Amino acid sequence: MRALVLPAVGAPLELVDRPVPEPGPGEARVRVQACGVCGSDLFLQKGGFGADKLPVVPGHEAAGVVDALGPGVSGLRVGDQVAIYYIDNPPDAPRPNLGPAVRRMGVDVDGAFAEYVVRPARTLIAPPKPVDPATLAVLTDAVGTPYHALVRIARVRPGETVAVLGVGGIGSNAVQIARALGARVVAVSRSEEKLALARELGAEAAVRMDEARDAIGSAGADVVVQCAESPALDEAAIALGGYGARIVLVGASVEPFAARSSDLIWRELAVMGSRGFTPDDIREVIDLHLAGRVRTDHLTAVQRPLEEGNDALEDLRAGRVLRSVLVP
């Protein structure tokens, strides 16, 4: 099979030939039909997960078809379409996405920038109806991540004001999910193109940062979802929260940001991290998509063959796309 390997920090992807992997007990082999290219792949490339993770085959936002089953697998059949949950975690972990024994596809083990990938069968999720492969792939992370942040962490309620900072591959979907939850949504971005997209996806207001306070209102936001890799926006998210607000950090940065305890105390702010998504999040966003409440065309418009993986990363780095999808 062909696969893209990231050999070292800062290096380009290398296209290699490898033997097709065989599934072991409790595992399934998936023929990859689509894999999204997202900011976490850039984070991996620049060493954000640690140089010790490399070399590795990236790719964590994927969908495909079950190609072979290892011994002891039940509930799946060869030919089933599946979304892939990128985390493998012991049953006694504190949460499906948390714990010291988390093993992440595309980071800790080889991922889906390849024609085939072997995964524990328990990490595969069959949709109730067929879904376009590129759509199914991006539903896992690009939609599942903001869904987790808004539903599981922030617990958004109808009528609340939600501010979304950063209208990228994650933030754009935070806009449409918050709107689907019945919230009033204010989107913040530097890009006029992304502000226009936010309006299409349901934002009542889409503004630049210097207009955010006026657009949100003097009471401040009930929930602020910070979706960009930016310490300055981490600080801005805290500043935009109203009394009793929940500030949810989704965009990962290794740089520190400043916060005053008095701001958190006087407004009783809750500053929370939201890490990825869970299998239940994937199931629920698939249902939202099938019900026509979540769209993905803004994420799947650019599809590339595996050979163009470096071009896909560069498009993302340069801000030319919200997502590219590799189609092996």
Image (cartoon, rainbow, N blue to C red):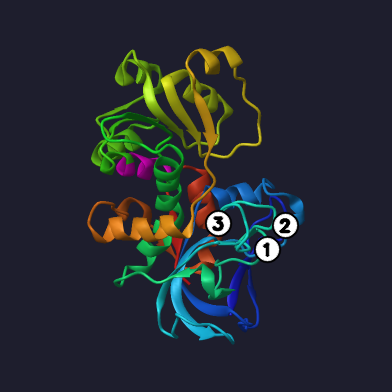
Q: Is residue 231 above or below residue 280?
A: above
The magenta region covers 170-177
In this rendered view, identify the residue nearer to me: 177 or 153. 153
Is there CB contact under 8 Å for labels 2 and 1? yes
- The amino acid at mark 3 is Pro
Q: Residues within 10 Å of mark 1 (few under 14, many from 20)?
A: many
| Residue shown at the point (37%, 23%) measured from the top left | 221
Question: Hey, which quadrant is residue 54 in on the image?
Answer: bottom right
- In percent of width and height, residue 233 lies at 51, 27
Residue labelled with disc 1: 56
**Secondary structure under the numbered disc 2 in the rendered image:** helix
Seen from the viewer's position, the closer of residues 23 and 133 is 23
Residue at image location 53% in from the left, 45% down from the top: 317
Apparent side of residue 157 relative to residue 316 in the rendered image (left or right): left
Label 3 sits on residue: 96
Residue at 64% over, 51% down: 44
What kind of residue is marked 1? Val
Q: CA distance from mark 2 to mark 3?
A: 21 Å
Q: Mark 1 or 3, which is nearer the eye?
A: 3
